[in-house]
């Protein structure tokens, strides 16, 4: 049998690391934003720079102008998103933790994107309800409570336009996406089953053109039909 050059055998930590470093050097202001978040004890769970770059490629390809994000943290992914929008584009980003939200407001000033971003404080479900009249939206990025993804997708089905983009982070469910609910620790069930339901809905070819991109955490991307 001849040796194949397709498939995954060329993706190693070394080759992947080289690609990430080459294509997504981190802007200095975003490195400073991470340092500020670390100083404040905010958990280091933002996108990686390479994933921020991927978001930019997706949003620019798509031509998204009006974007919603659920789960701001300190604003890292929001800055990557804001920088992918045209001059008349806007991001609404939703966050319920006040330390995270206060820090994100600072980060938006530090990085010069404040005018393009509206931070909506409070639980994601309330925030989504409060921005409905600004829709319909071109894209939504889900990155908050994992058990909440199906509910956020219900909202997106009404408020993201046909042809719009739905993106979810952490869709490998921290390595547990393939597992039966009964085999999981009860504390891990709601998040895992939420992410399973989210992925299954976006895998329905009648309603979406979707894929689960193999980032470190898994990133599901789907176009709404
Ligand atoms: N998108 C960010 C990372 C988000 S981390 C980035 O890549 O930079 C997840 C965030 O969601 C945390 O800040 C957490 O406080 C927030 N969160 C968790 N549950 C939430 C909810 N129900 N409503 C709004 N925000 C929530
Ligand atoms: C967690 C949340 C995230 O969105 C992420 O990308 C990584 C970790 C968490 O809640 O632990
Ligand atoms: Mg995430």
Image (spheres, helix red, strand yellow):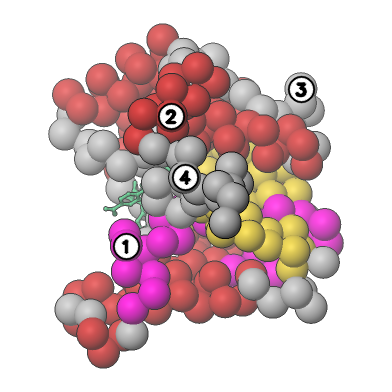
| Marks 1 and 3, how far apart at CA | 38 Å
Q: Nearer the viewer, mark 2 or mark 4?
A: 4
**Which residue is labeled 2 in the image?**
15
Residue 84 lies within the magenta run: no
Identify the residue at horizontal 82%, vertical 57% (top origin): 163
Badge 2 density bin: few <14, some 14–19, many ≥20, Cα 10 Å: few
Q: Quadrant of the N terminus?
A: bottom right
Query: In the image shown, does 12 or 96 lie closer to the viewer?
Result: 12
Report the number of numbered marks: 4
Closest to the camera, between mark 3 and mark 4, is 4
- Left or right: 12, with 208 as reference point: left
Q: Residue furthest front?
A: 1
Q: Which residue is mark 1?
A: 175
Q: CA distance from mark 3 to mark 4?
A: 41 Å
Residue 136 position within the rendered picture, expressed as x and y whole percent measured from the top left? 77, 55
Which residue is most to the bottom?
A: 182
């Amino acid at each position: 049998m001849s040796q194949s050059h397709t498939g995954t055998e060329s993706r190693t930590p070394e080759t992947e690391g080289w690609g990430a470093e080459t294509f997504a050097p981190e802007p200095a202001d975003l490195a400073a934003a991470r340092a500020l978040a670390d100083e404040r004890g905010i958990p280091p769970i933002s996108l990686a720079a390479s994933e921020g770059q991927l978001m930019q490629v997706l949003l620019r390809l798509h031509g998204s102008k009006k974007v919603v994000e659920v789960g701001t943290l300190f604003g890292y992914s929001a800055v990557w998103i804001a920088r992918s929008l045209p001059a008349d584009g806007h991001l609404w980003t939703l966050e319920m933790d006040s330390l995270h939200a206060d820090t994100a407001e600072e980060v938006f000033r530090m990085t010069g994107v404040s005018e393009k971003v509206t931070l909506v404080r409070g639980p994601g479900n309330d925030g989504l309800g409060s921005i409905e009249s600004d829709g319909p939206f071109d894209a939504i990025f889900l990155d908050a409570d994992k058990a909440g993804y199906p509910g956020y997708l219900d909202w997106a089905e009404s408020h993201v336009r046909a042809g719009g983009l739905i993106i979810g982070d952490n869709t490998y469910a921290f390595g547990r996406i393939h597992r039966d609910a009964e085999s999981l620790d009860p504390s891990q069930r709601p998040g895992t089953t939420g992410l399973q339901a989210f992925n299954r809905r976006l895998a329905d070819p009648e309603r979406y053109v979707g894929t689960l991109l193999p980032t470190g955490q898994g990133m599901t991307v789907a176009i709404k039909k």
